[in-house]
Image (cartoon, helix red, strand yellow):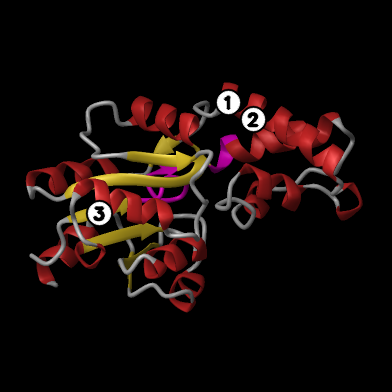
Amino acid sequence: MPYKAVIFDLDGTLADTLDDIASAMNRVLHTRGYPVHTHRDYKYMVGRGLENLVTSALPETARVSQVMDSCLADLKEEYGRNCLVNTRLYNGIEILLMSLHEMHVKTSVFSNKAVDLTQKIINTLLPGHPFEIVVGAQQGLPKKPDPAGALLISERTGISPAETIYLGDSDVDMITANAAGMIAVGALWGFRTEVELRSNGARFVLKRPIDLIDFILET
C-alpha cells in the first residue's frame, strides 16, 4: 500500500459548512445595508480564508480597509457563535475515517479556516477520531495554496509527501497538494466542480468518501 497518510480539507470535504458561513456573512452584509448573496454564490467565495470571503462578498465600492476590517471582525464574531448551527458531516465520512484508522493510515486536517474554529468543528463533529494533527489558519503559517501547512503535517507525522494523499474539493486544495508533492485527490461531493478540480491538478476525483478506500487499495 503506497499511501500511509491522508490530509483532509474541512469545508466541502469533511463537512458541509456552507449554510453557516453564508448565513453569517449575509447577516454582516445586511446590517450594513449591502446586498446579500445566495448560498450557491458562496460556493465560489469560500476556501481562501475569511479575509478573502469578506473581500469577495462586499461590493467593489466598499472594499476599503476600514470597511473590510470592520466586516471581518463582525464576521469572526458572528460565525464563531454560529458555526455549528447547520454544519454537518457529509454522508460516509465517519465510515471512511473508521476504515482508514483500521488500515493504519494516519489522518490529519489542514484548513484555511481559523485554527480555533477548525478545531471547534472537528472536536464537535468528530470527537472520537484520532487525527494526528489539525491545522488551521494561524499567525506565522501561510494559508493555502501555500504548501507550508501540508508540509508541516508531513514533517510531524514522519510520512513523506509522496506517501500522502491530500483530499479536498477546490482548486486551492489541488494546487496545495501538488505544490507539497502530495497526491491531489478531488472530492466531488463538495462545493466545486470536477472541471475545476481536474484543471487544477487533481490526479483523481472521487464521487463518494468511501471511494478513497478503493483508490488506496487498488493503487
Q: Are marks 2 and 1 in contact (CB under 8 Å)?
A: yes
Query: Position of 32 compared to 208: left or right?
Result: right
Q: Position of residue 155 (x, y in %)?
A: 26, 51
Q: Nearer the viewer, residue 65 or 15?
A: 65
Using the image, tell me which numbered label, if any, was put on residue 6. Answer: 3
Residue under the image location 19 percent in, 64 percent down: 163
Residue 85 rendering spot, x and y as whole percentages: 52, 26
> Gap in Å between the C-alphas at discs 3 and 1?
27 Å
Q: Is residue 17 magenta?
A: yes
Tag 2 secondary structure: helix
Instruction: Kindly identify which residue carries mark 1.
Output: 80
The answer, for residue 92, to whether it is visible in the render is no
Dot 3 or dot 2: first in sequence order is 3
Report the label total: 3
Amino acid under disc 3: Val
Spatial separation of the CA atoms under disc 3 and disc 2: 29 Å
